[in-house]
Image (cartoon, rainbow, N blue to C red):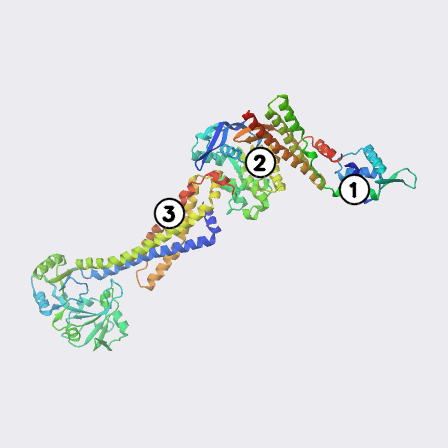
Amino acid sequence: MIDIAIKNLGTRKVRTFLCILAVLAGVFLVGVTLVMNDWMYGTMTAELAKYMGKIYVQQGESTYPPFDSTLSQDTATAILDRTDLGLNLAESAPLIFVRTERGMMPFIPAEKMVIGVPAGREAILIGTVASNSGLNHFAVGEKGDVAILGKTVAQDFSAKVGQDITINGTKVRVIGILEKSSMDSVNIAAIMPMEAVQRIFVKQGQVSSVLLTLQDVRKTAEVAARLEQDYPALGIVTQDDMLAEAEQVMKMPIMYMSSMGVTGMIVAMIVIMSTMFMAVTERTREFGTLRALGARRRMVVGTVLIEALILALIGVPPAMGLVFLMSKAMETTPPDTFKLVQTIVFTVVAAMVGAAYPAWRAARVEPLEALRYE
Amino acid sequence: MLPYTLLGLLASQPRHGYDLKNAIEQAFGGQREINFGQIYTTLSRLERDALVTASVAEDGRGKKTYRITPKGRKELEAWLNQTVEKIETYKDEFLVKLIVRHLAGYGDALEAITRQRQAYLQQLRDLTALSVRKGDDPYVSLLIEGAMLHLQADLHWLDICDERLDHLEKLS
Amino acid sequence: MNTIVETKHVCKTYGMNGVAVEAIRGIDLTVNAGEFVALVGPSGSGKSSLLYLIGAMDSPTSGEVLFEGRDLAKLRDGPRTDLRAKNIGFVFQTFNLLPTLNAFENIEIAMRLAGMGRSERQSRAAELLGRVGLSERAKHQPRYLSGGERQRVAIARALGNHPRLLLADEPTGNLDSKTGTGILELLRTICSEDGQTVIMVTHDFRAASYADRVLVMRDGRIRGETKLQAGQNINQAMEKLLELELQ
């Protein structure tokens, strides 16, 4: 029966071709949706993973990074001096975040920022990311206008180690450029000594937040609760909070993306319904003849469904190829086998739903149709 | 139509009586043996009417050669160019039989129609077999074709008889 | 005598746009093996409807249609379709060949639907194509065949499954008279030589004269039946004709 289906599709080459194109577009949209949603989630979870067990104390429950939060340095010190919280002091420090370029997408907070960290505590931010100059820390007690740049920022400034760049009107010496990190917040940051940032951006005595790392990660919720009690005016942000907020932010783009994917599926469905409906109407006499010759209803219906399936599935490899290329170009995660399977399932569903009505019409054709003489 | 057939043959060239017989038989596909007597009777009449002339050959063997006269030619041409009226073929003995059957009070026309239909159909079938065998000669095949068409028309007419008389019977 | 199909007071009423049309009003008909039957009548006489009922394409409103003893009226669509596939061959006025398949494949499809195996149906298709004289046209699609050739393919298709019945609905309706004669001769041959039972519907008496039995239909009833002999006394017929011309 497949050979007959292929022959039938081959008689109306233009119509078949156009249908396949439209389905291809629909499948492409579905593929893009799956990939983009996946990427957004993936990027976000990767980002937030590093905040496990950490608590940010900041003003208000505002976004991460806390660009709009202002905390007095004294308060910060007071919190850090507490002995009852079980703090890992080597990994805890006040931080100041200044956004120098806004983010383009709603779920990307910033394109470029400056982070001020007390000299000696750079590791909190940089972690194990290597620097091409071998320098990924400040000299102890450093107060000068020096910066360690993340990869993306360095590219944007076309900066080299030892060069000077201008930040907020001040000349800053680049002492290190980091390798590309999986954490995007490092890539887009210029990390400077706390004191320098406070001076350059006129925020003396101020910090944005205090990053607290606990010795016992499991105590995060407990410590967070205690801090909330002690400092009702301040915002206590844990990884869970950040996750919740990120999900909130991502709701819109995910919905937008998904609606694109759904539209893609609907387009594919309608095109298939339209194409098969035309085919069935034109071939009423042919179906009648087949029935008269002894074909069961289910065979006639099967022909329609198989043709619809072929039309739909032919578009899947090229569409997924395009999705693959697009994801490479946009540096998002490329589709994996599971996505391919998902796409195929969606395509098949769309094709069958679209073909349902034409198939029903085909089933209703009686042998007598073969004798209708126009 | 024999007179005109002879005139036609003589119009192309003068012939002997025997040639005329052969020519006619050829024209009708070699199927029919024509009676000499018929031919000579007709020729005499044509001579009498001054449409042909007869002359005896010099060799004195007594074979007459016949020629067409100008008057004969005119007569022939007039006949050829005159269109044919189809009155004669409307004569139908079966219709008369149906009427008489009714007049005689015998009823059961349907039975008669069915039997007549059988006769016509059988004739049609025979002619079909004939046309397959004799189809090569164009004039013969025209003859057969014409006959078949007439039979078909008669069969349709029988259907109409059937329908109308049936209708009449239902009314009475 | 082997009875292939028998109808007992069969009736068929169609409901068209709310109006009931009585196409067949009680017909008793018996067709035996090897017969060539013609159903003649004007349009609306019900002859085609009767053919569809005999061909298991439709169910009667009342009465019985017995195909080798089995009442078709009692069969549901599935079994009826299967019976049709295996036992009945159909030839249409409009040929109805599948346009995407070539002549060979068109003949094959009927056998495929009846479940015949690949090698068997291919050899039979080749055989039938030869039987109807179209072996060199095997690879041609219908649009490259003349009307007469298409009908021949259709006849070959109908014969694929060694059907008990070959049904023809106005087989010469779309053909000129010369081509039509060829088709009728073919039907006559497969009946006479192969013993195929043929039932043909026609409005043309000339076509009907090829049959052994001619049934005349009008208004859903049979008006009369005629039995015909093979062409005899041919030379006598010729004589009579010529006589007329020479008077």
A146 up-or-down from B3: above or below? below
- Mark 1 residue element: helix
Q: Which residue is denoted by mark 1 in the rendering?
A: B76
The three-letter code of the residue at mark 3 reads: Met
Q: Nearer the viewer, residue B66 or A123?
A: B66
Quadrant in the rendering for residue A179: bottom left
Q: Quick check: A67 above or below B8?
A: below
Task: Chain letter for mark 1, please.
Answer: B
Where is mark 2, residue-wise? C203
Find residue B26 and report its horizontal and vertical position in percent: 77, 39
The residue drawn where x is 67% and y is 28% is B93
Circle 3 or circle 1, nearest the eye: 1
Per the model, the C-alpha gap separating discs 3 and 1 is 82 Å
Q: Secondary structure at mark 3?
A: helix
Give the x, y percent position of residue C203: 57, 36
Most foreground residue, C78 or B36 = B36
Q: Is residue A226 above or below residue C147?
A: below
Indicate the secondary structure of the residue bearing disc 2: loop
- Kind of residue at disc 1: Leu
Name the residue carrying label 3: A352
Q: Quadrant of residue A263?
A: bottom left
The residue at 27%/72% (across/down) is: A156
Mark 3 vs 1: CB contact within 8 A: no
Left or right relative to A178: residue C240: right
The mark lying in front, picked from 3 and 2, is: 2
Residue B50 is left or right of residue A45, and the answer is right
- Say whether marks 2 and 1 touch (CB < 8 Å): no
